[in-house]
Image (cartoon, coloured by chain):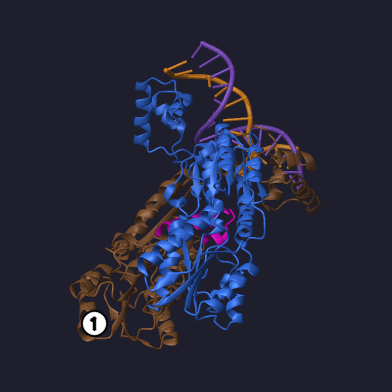
Chain colours: A brown, B blue, C orange, D purple
Amino acid sequence: MSRVSSRITLQDVAREAGVSLATADRVLNGRAGVREATAGRVRDVVARLGYRPNAAAARLARGETYRFCFVLPSGPNVFMRQLAEQVTNTAEWLSTHNAFIDLLRVDVFAPEALAATLEGLIGRYDGVAVVALDHPRVRSAIDDLTAAGMVVVTLVSDVPSSHRRHYVGVDNIAAGRTAGTLIGRFAGGRQGAVGLIVGTPALRDHAERQFGFTQVLSGEYPSLKVLPVQESLDEDHRTQEIVEQMLREVPDLVGLYNVGAGNGGIAAALAAFGRAGELVFVGHDLTDDTRRFLLRGVMDAVINQDAGHQSRSAARVLLAHCSGEPLFDEQERIRIDIFVRDNLP
Amino acid sequence: MSRVSSRITLQDVAREAGVSLATADRVLNGRAGVREATAGRVRDVVARLGYRPNAAAARLARGETYRFCFVLPSGPNVFMRQLAEQVTNTAEWLSTHNAFIDLLRVDVFAPEALAATLEGLIGRYDGVAVVALDHPRVRSAIDDLTAAGMVVVTLVSDVPSSHRRHYVGVDNIAAGRTAGTLIGRFAGGRQGAVGLIVGTPALRDHAERQFGFTQVLSGEYPSLKVLPVQESLDEDHRTQEIVEQMLREVPDLVGLYNVGAGNGGIAAALAAFGRAGELVFVGHDLTDDTRRFLLRGVMDAVINQDAGHQSRSAARVLLAHCSGEPLFDEQERIRIDIFVRDNLP
DNA sequence: CTGTTAGCGCATTCAC
DNA sequence: GTGAATGCGCTAACAG
């Protein structure tokens, strides 16, 4: 709370350089219309005095207000619910910084609907964060938005071929590999079959996780063979049926990797067959359910991508791109968290 | 970048409530000297209009400047070097927000020196972040600082009995438990001995990790017995000697847990005896070394506490406490990261 | 108890 | 090319 006015301002720089405030500002913000000689002089003074712009003052003077739209999948998926909740928190925080978030939820399995929704956003926002579907229509909608001068970031699920400015999310191939290593190691030399369940291979993140997982298991754990992939549509009752069938038909089943949601169904199936805690079971997304499964030893590891981080990161990235403020890349990398029962947050 | 002046300001609130700007401000910031009736009226209008304070304007008007001091251990410890580097980055960022960090490094194994350093800080800073030593002299020094009105947060290593305002760091007992579970699971039913190496049991974090680790292994993996703890002083050549002796004298050695630094020495010892990749080896702190060891299969898992997060979190906490801005606890929780070779950042 | 007023540091007109 | 002047929204004296 020091009140020492020691802080160097643009005024100081201007005076010291023998120019006006306006000129100093032009140099500092790289605006045109300053003779190179003058500019050099200003830059020298900036360096010599160690001038640092005052972020609060700049924002206040600029007085701009930013409007962002977050487009998330509708439906009962727990992770998406968490994400939506975190987006709400982020919105609360941003509102104090002159930025506002609208949250839209659209059917994730309908590329046409998603594309149409996106196109309807043109001109209405400064930036858009979207949990994307890797589909030509969606890609083209994203490109239309960027062509209209909007900043678009993909969230959780990427469309690399689009013109999105940034992807906020994890490397899902690596996430799948991580699951593979965990199951491989936890199986501890046992020989047998491993069940693999995805929500739908149409989702890029699911496909990537499956790829990474299979890669590691087949490459490095030859004693474990991966069963043909099953599709659950992320529904508990489907995962339960799938796993019950496996338990019935695959005598040497030693592990399960669930790429998507529906872990509750798996736990139910394991309980019904009295095999909980015996099979190695790895899944995604830390929820009340999976946390409980970890604590009870039903699940052995949960791979997680923090919804709060992703929401805040998307907001920071949008804000930085719109306002021209700097971004610290390292801080924006989303990590693949591994949780076992002892390092639960 | 909408220029719509739609934003509601305190002026609007004041006008609508039929009071002056100053009164509205007093209500909003909980300052005394407003009749309850008036205050209620203002709060109503705030709610009705959905007024959100403008953070930038508030900071600018307040015009305070904050001075923080970060006190880190000197010495060659890699993690502490990373932390120092991150503190420098954080300082860079803070300087734009009217806050300044001085970084001090003192001998970590000398409580007297640390305490003296801390006492020398009285009155010179608004806040202090310190990698503390749990020692009566240090505790009392911390309490002296807080008594002098300074905000103190402990970083990485806590002194729970002190009056520090906040601890920025992980739960080290949980970190030790996590190591225990990983080694227990990775050992995959093998029977044998597990080596345990700490830097020094005088460091609270080392002691806590050791405790958590032993707790899990003895409680849940009876087929693994923990060897008597060895002290390395975090030095490579000491860890190397320790591990070479273990490899010589303990025929059934199946795992190693290194609580502190010195993983390079362990890798060297394992290589010398041709046992790398065969023993389960878990340690702390992601560095260039440990990253390489993971990739080469020498280490099986690295438990990490992100230096960047901790540095930024400490800064945010100090700033929030000094300026009275709100803090989002959830965002300030430091996680226990588990890295295997597939989820390296 | 309440109101008036003067900036905070910078971006941005509009003159020159 | 450059400078002078105005105001962003809020806080903190100071007056009443």
Question: Image quadrant for the C terminus of chain A?
Answer: bottom left
Percent position of residue A193, x then y? 31, 85
Residue A61 visible: no
Q: Is residue A176 left or right of residue B322?
A: left
**Corner quadrant of residue B45:** top left
Residue farthest toward the left in the current orientation of the protein = A272
Could you tell me which secondary element the residue under label 1 belongs to?
Answer: helix
Dot 1, how many residues are within 10 Å of its Cα: few (below 14), some (14-19), or many (20+)? some
Percent position of residue A250, x then y? 24, 86
Callout 1: chain = A
Residue where numbered disc 1 is placed:
A246
Q: In front here: A273 or B199?
A: B199
Membership of A308 in magenta stretch = yes
Range of the magenta residues?
A307-332
Main secondary structure of the magenta stretch? helix
Rendered residue at 43%/60% (across/down): B212
Residue farthest toward the front in the current orientation of the protein = B249
